[in-house]
Structures are given as structure tokens and as C-alpha cells.
Image: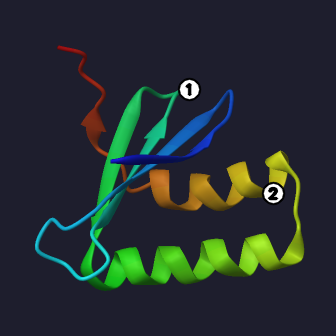
């Protein structure tokens, strides 16, 4: 697992392998305390969007806005063990 992004509102980790060529991405919405795991085509779509953002050299607010579009799908509460 690799931490890709960490702000006051979001954290994004990349999981390698997981049965998919690109692995998957876990997005944690720290404000709502929810998370979502993206794999397969959705993970590929997410990665392409991130690469476009990086190319545009956007600020943290734009990245957080981008991530919030994915976390609206998040239904799993964050549970610490």
C-alpha cells in the first residue's frame, strides 16, 4: 500500500496487485469518516483523472473537489482496529 495523497479532508492509498493489473485505490473522506475502494475499470478511470489533475498543476482545493465526486459513493464507515 502506498499513500498517494493526504490532506485535511482526504487520504488516498494505492493497493498494488489485488487481482487487477493496476491494483486499486482506497479513498478516505476524513470529514464524513467514510471510505470507498476502487478497482477494475473504476480504478482506471480514477487514475486517468488523477493524471489529468497532475498535468494541470492544481491546488489542494481542486484535488479535494475531484475526490469528493468519488466519496459520494462511499458507504463504508472507517473503522480502526
Image position of 53 (left or right of 2): right
Badge 1 marks a residue whose secondary structure is loop
Residue underneath mark 2: 62
Query: Alpha-carbon distance for marks 1 and 2?
Result: 16 Å
Point 29% across, 44% down: residue: 75
Element class at badge 2:
helix
Provide residue 38's location: percent of width, then percent of height: 32, 64
- Residue 29, given in percent of the width and then of the height, sits at 50, 37
Crowdedness near tag 1: few (<14), some (14–19) or many (≥20) residues, C-alpha within 10 Å: few
Residue 35, image x, y percentages: 36, 41
Mark 1 or mark 2: whose residue is earlier in sequence: 1
Which residue in the structure is indicated by mark 1? 31
> Which residue is nearer to you in this view: 14 or 65?
14
Foreground pick, 75 / 15: 15
Categorize mark 2 by other alpha carbons within 10 Å: few (<14), some (14-19), many (20+): few
Compared with 4, 38 (above or below) is below
Which quadrant: the C terminus? top left
| Mark closer to the observer (1, 2) | 2
Q: Residue at x 66, y 61 (%)?
A: 66
Amino acid at each position: 500500500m502506498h499513500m498517494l495523497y493526504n490532506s485535511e479532508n482526504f487520504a488516498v492509498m494505492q493497493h498494488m496487485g489485488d487481482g487487477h493489473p493496476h491494483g486499486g485505490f482506497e479513498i478516505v473522506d476524513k470529514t464524513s469518516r467514510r471510505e470507498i475502494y476502487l478497482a477494475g475499470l473504476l480504478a482506471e478511470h480514477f487514475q486517468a483523472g488523477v493524471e489529468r489533475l497532475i498535468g494541470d498543476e492544481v491546488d489542494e482545493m481542486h484535488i479535494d473537489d475531484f475526490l469528493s465526486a468519488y466519496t459520494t459513493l462511499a458507504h463504508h464507515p472507517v473503522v480502526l482496529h
